[in-house]
Image (spheres, rainbow, N blue to C red):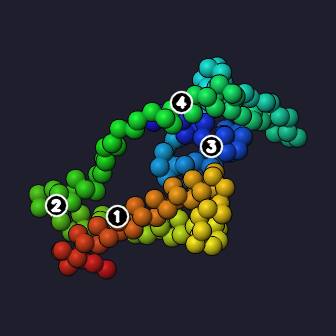
Amino acid sequence: MALEHALLVALVEKPGSGLELTRRFEKSFGYFWAATHQQIYRVLGRMVADGLLDVEVVAQDGRPDKKVYAVTDAGRAWIADWIGTPTPMETLRSDIAVKMRAASLGDREAVLRNVAAARDDHRVRLAHYRQLEAAYGDLSDLSRLDDVTRDQYLVLSGGIRMEEYLIAWLTDYLRAYGADT
């Protein structure tokens, strides 16, 4: 997947400025597709040049003009074509997993501290995801949600499960060395 795909999805959901997109990436998309502020602006410019986005310049009092991006028909067609293409299995890259595997070669106590810190980070993210989940209200009948909201919730649900798995995995490692705190 390219950043273009994530930006198009975000902009189909709601047009916005580069700054607004950066903030949305920090709060949601960034949990599964990271991008810097500079990358977002660079790609937005390229997408406008490619005809995937329109840009409207909005004057602001006391601040520079704001560029608001919206998806064109060509952009919608491009994302629709991409959605239908096969997705190869993603390769997991994990520094902590490599450190865990190599712990016997160095300072295991440092690795255990790193694992405990990583688990704490995943607990914080899980708590954040749970807060987001609570905003959906009653989830006993997902069919009551419109398609866009249901898709967003199901991605969030996958993130919750991933965080629960990672917390359990890191806890297992800590317990194996008597370091579960």
Amino acid found under the numbered disc labelled 2: Ala
Compared with 102, 164 (above or below) is: below
Q: Are marks 1 and 4 in contact (CB under 8 Å)?
A: no
> Can you identify the residue that label 2 sits on?
103
Residue at (25% x, 56% y) in the render:
97
Compared with 157, 83 (above or below) is: above
Which structural element holds mark 1?
helix
Name the N-terminal-most of marks 3 and 4.
Answer: 3
Residue at (53% x, 30% y) in the render:
81
Name the N-terminal-most of marks 3 and 1.
Answer: 3
Q: Quadrant of the C terminus?
A: bottom left
> Can you identify the residue that label 4 sits on?
81
Q: Are marks 3 and 1 in contact (CB under 8 Å)?
A: no
Q: Quadrant of the N terminus?
A: top left
**Distance between the Cα atoms at labels 1 and 2?**
18 Å
> Can you identify the residue that label 1 sits on?
166
Amino acid found under the numbered disc labelled 3: Ala
How many marks are shown on the rendered structure?
4
Name the N-terminal-most of marks 3 and 2.
Answer: 3
> Can you identify the residue that label 3 sits on?
10
Quadrant in the rendering for residue 52: top right
Query: Disc 1 or disc 2, which is closer to the eye?
Result: 1
Amino acid found under the numbered disc labelled 1: Leu
**Distance between the Cα atoms at labels 3 and 4?**
16 Å
Amino acid found under the numbered disc labelled 4: Asp
Mark 4 crowd level (few <14, some 14–19, many ≥20, 10 Å Cα): few
**Distance between the Cα atoms at labels 3 and 2?**
40 Å
Name the N-terminal-most of marks 2 and 4.
Answer: 4
Observer-nearest of 90 and 139: 139
**Residue 131 shows up from this direction:** no
Which structural element holds mark 4?
helix
| Residue 107 in picture, x, y percent from top left | 17, 63
